[in-house]
Structures are given as structure tokens and as C-alpha cells.
Image: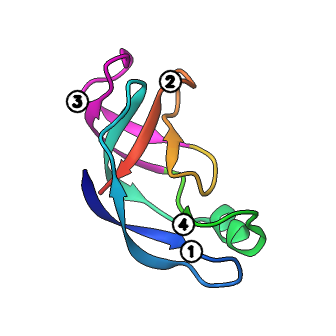
Amino acid sequence: MLELPGIVLAELGRLPSLETITLHPPGPEEVLVRIAASGICHTDLGYVQYARACPVILGHEGAGMVEEVGERVQHVKPGDHVAIIGRTAFPVLMLGGLSPRVRARWMR
């Protein structure tokens, strides 16, 4: 398990804050990506205002390098550079251009 920083909306009506999050190793269909660039965009800010559930980790776009892959992942391998797109406020994100079953987890 890794402990990493993340921008977290812990409660509705409060501002997001930088918190330590625990990241488990990738599952069979997941990819662990070391993030080189990421940001919080207007979509994330809208989620802060209209969130339906908390806590959530903000940020859903980024680019980085694959660190680890789950046993069923065949589309990427450690060392591949990837761009990540996904849905707002989901701590588990989809890799752009790959099978929707392949998922990525943030890693700084």
C-alpha cells in the first residue's frame, strides 16, 4: 500500500483539502500510473458545489507513466506513457483510448 497526497472533498459544503490517501496495489484489471501532470478543472469545481456523496478525490485528467499493471491487463505495460481521462471525482479512473474495463489509479 502507498500513502499519497490527494485533493479530497471530505464533506458537502466544505472546501476540498490536501489529505493523505491510501492506495492499494492494482487489481486484476487496473493500472497504476505515476502522474507527471494533472489538474483540477471546472468540472471538479462543479462537483464540489453539487456533490451527491462524499468523500471523493478530485481530479480526472492527467498524464504519466505506467508503474504496475494487473494480471489481466494486456493493453499497456510498465514504462508506457499514458494520458488519463475519466469522470469527475472518481478515485478509480479510465485510461483514454483503452478498453473501458482497464482502469487506472492515481499515483504521484
Q: Residue at x 30, y 63 (%)?
A: 4
**Disc 4/disc 1 C-alpha distance (Å):** 16 Å
| Quarter of image, res 13 | bottom right
**Disc 3/disc 2 C-alpha distance (Å):** 15 Å
Disc 4 + disc 3, Cβ < 8 Å: no
Mark with earlier residue (1, 2): 1
Q: Position of residue 72 (x, y in %)?
A: 37, 16
Crowding at label 3, few (<14), some or many (≥20) Cα neighbours within 10 Å? few
Q: Is residue 91 above or below residue 83?
A: below
Mark with earlier residue (3, 1): 1
Which residue bears the numbered disc 4? 40
Disc 4 + disc 1, Cβ < 8 Å: no
Crowding at label 4, few (<14), some or many (≥20) Cα neighbours within 10 Å? some
Mark with earlier residue (3, 2): 3
Crowding at label 1, few (<14), some or many (≥20) Cα neighbours within 10 Å? some
Quadrant that contains the C terminus: bottom left
Q: Amino acid at mark 4?
A: Ile
Residue 78's tag is 3
Which residue bears the numbered disc 2? 98
Mark with earlier residue (4, 1): 1
Q: Amino acid at mark 2?
A: Leu
Q: Amino acid at mark 3?
A: Pro
**Disc 1/disc 2 C-alpha distance (Å):** 31 Å
Mark with earlier residue (4, 3): 4
Which residue bears the numbered disc 1? 10
Specify whether 75 is left or right of 79: right
Observer-side mark, 1 or 2, equals 1
- Identify the magenta region: 62-85
